[in-house]
Image: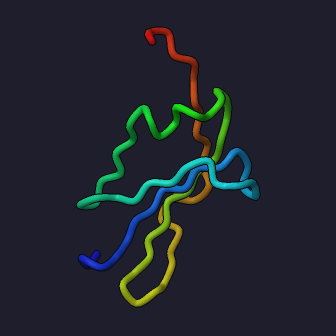
Amino acid sequence: MFDDDTITLTVRKTANSDVAFSKTAENGVINLVPTDTKSLTTGNYVYDIQLTTFGGNIYTIVPISNFEIGEEVTQ
């Protein structure tokens, strides 16, 4: 990986629906924080992670997978 490469996590309700949220890695790490999912309803979603190289090539490095947003007990 080069400094100009980008790794992006994209979450959707279904593979073809609008993006629920996305995050770009910083120093190779994707950090999720409560505000990322605060506006989303609980339930099942899907995600993938893509690498976009400095040359513009796009690779799906984590294929479509399940992503679950659960209920919070302590608020």
Question: Residue 64 placed where, x, y %?
Answer: 62, 55
Q: Quadrant of the C terminus?
A: top left
Q: Nearer the viewer, residue 5 or 61?
A: 5
Q: Is residue 43 above or below residue 1?
A: above
Residue sitting at the far bottom: 55
Question: Residue 46 placed where, x, y %?
Answer: 64, 47
Taking 30 as reference, is 59 left or right? Answer: right
Colour basis: rainbow
Q: Nearer the viewer, residue 38 or 71?
A: 38
Q: Is residue 74 above or below residue 5?
A: above
Q: Residue at x 30, y 79 (%)?
A: 4
Residue sitting at the far top: 74
Picture quadrant of residue 32: top left
Q: Is residue 45 above or below residue 60?
A: above
Q: Quadrant of the N terminus?
A: bottom left
| Number of numbered discs visible in the structure rendering | 0
Question: Residue 54 placed where, x, y %?
Answer: 36, 85
Q: Residue at x 30, y 53 (%)?
A: 29
Q: Residue at x 44, y 54 (%)?
A: 23
Question: Residue 11 placed where, x, y %?
Answer: 58, 50
Q: Residue at x 73, y 49 (%)?
A: 14
